[in-house]
Amino acid sequence: MESRCENCIVRQFNSLRAMTKDELKKVSDSKVYKKIKKGDPLFEEGEKLDGVFCVRDGVSKLSKLSTNGKDQVVKLATKGSVIGQRSVIAEEHTNLSAVAVNDMEVCFVPKENILSTLQRNPDFAIEVLRHMAHDLKEADDVIVNMSQKTVKQRVAEAFLYLKQNFGEDNKGFLRLTLSREDIANVVGTATESCIRIISEFKKKGYLDTSGKKIKIADERGLKDLAQGF
Amino acid sequence: MESRCENCIVRQFNSLRAMTKDELKKVSDSKVYKKIKKGDPLFEEGEKLDGVFCVRDGVSKLSKLSTNGKDQVVKLATKGSVIGQRSVIAEEHTNLSAVAVNDMEVCFVPKENILSTLQRNPDFAIEVLRHMAHDLKEADDVIVNMSQKTVKQRVAEAFLYLKQNFGEDNKGFLRLTLSREDIANVVGTATESCIRIISEFKKKGYLDTSGKKIKIADERGLKDLAQGF
DNA sequence: CACAAAACATGACAATTATCATGTTCTAAC
DNA sequence: GTTAGAACATGATAATTGTCATGTTTTGTG
């Protein structure tokens, strides 16, 4: 199910939309389409990347191993995201690992494409800058949440985030299903604490579950809780 | 003590070094030199910035107010740093407040200078990108530290950071003196907890104090502690 | 120099969260 | 369908951290 970047819809969501037709053609010619199975890595922390990944489908968790041996999920990248930009631009090894949370389809774009377009097309450079600026703002917000909110508040926020960014299916269940462990690693807490809080949220009517699927039952309540009421 | 950007040394440390002579001349003609007193703000969270600040001397804390009313310091900007880039580039209101930690000298550079140079000079755009990429990596590291390390470990890291980034005077005291409250806001903890930990570090011989001045007495010990040994 | 305000310090206690132990349920492979 | 292993769940307990109260020291200002 491969196709030309020029016609790719996900491009609309990322900085590649600022490329000219010519530039896109080159990207299209050199890109490599890949399928990645749930649980498999796109790359590991510390690797040298020769390009970026444009996510066509599926979700990847970007995480970093802490010195205490726990994995902290820093970001979830979904359809339209470009992964690996930071390390390609800084010409550094990656500071994060990327693992597929569910089956993914991605296009690998060699870094030469990116770097030469940055040199020649200021609109593209500015578009990339805007995206990076946005990521930086989000990272700042995460820092504040991590340090100033309780675990309970952060779990509540995590579910609101999942609804906002990945939506719900027709039954109202969150489209993206994460394991309790993954949620704990997003929130930065022990898996048991996370499970406990989810149980509590069920009892209090904030959440509903059916197997692994989770549904937000009281969004207002969760929001209030996340704000500290 | 004003002067021409072309001759300014601090420019070497930031993205302005990628500007051409002509571009620098324009910046120099339109920049405004300002002195900011300890404790005074450069700008407040939510403001619209009409330009960036190039720090010539002194230190500014960049912080964000949490919903619980506490201020979280996200970054400390020192000589050579450019403050406000993110929000000028994203054309958004600032997500952080900037307050002078000690007396500062800064040059305010109107955003038109920055934005037009970004459009015309790819080297400058790439240089800015590199800096932003670096900031983003640091932010990721902070996220991991905040969520996976104990308060004690984070306090230890904070002092190592202060030594690394601001150095020591000839007596071995940290050059940058922060109040206990500021340190607590960097580390993301209660002021009392921070004070308690500093006292403990003194007792254990990791730190030495003389009035408000703090000296790192056992760097190896602090490092081990920060790593979790 | 005096004195008020801010910063620093410490104790007592409560709340939050992690850890360890153990049991149950789900799931994928045979 | 069995069955082993993973994921989920919960209790008990300990460790960490925050909060409130109170006292001391430092600092800046008239």
Image: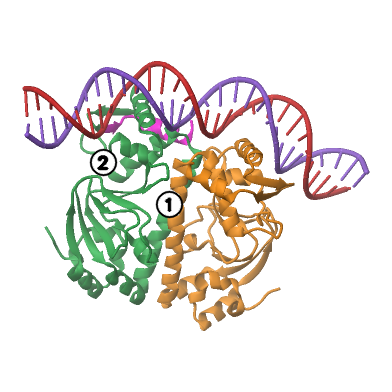
Chain colours: A green, B orange, C purple, D red
User: Mark 1 near mark 2, Cβ–Cβ under 8 Å?
Assistant: no
Vertical arrangement, residue B174 with respect to residue A154, above or below? below
Q: Nearer the viewer, mark 1 or mark 2?
A: 1
Q: Which mark is residue A176?
A: 2
Query: How far is mark 1 from mark 2, CA to CA?
Result: 23 Å
Q: Residue at x 57, y 58 (%)?
A: B165
Q: Residues within 10 Å of mark 1 (few under 14, many from 20)?
A: many
Which quadrant does the N terminus of chain A fall into? bottom left
Residue where numbered disc 1 is placed: B140
Asked if residue A221 is among those painted magenta in the image, a careful observer would answer yes
In the image, is B105 to the left or to the right of A54?
right
Task: Using the image, name the chain to which the residue with label 2 belongs.
Answer: A
Q: Please identify the quarter of the rendering in which residue A52 is found.
A: bottom left
Bounds of the magenta segment: A214-229
Asked if residue A116 is among those painted magenta in the image, a careful observer would answer no
Q: Residue at x 63, y 70 (%)?
A: B32
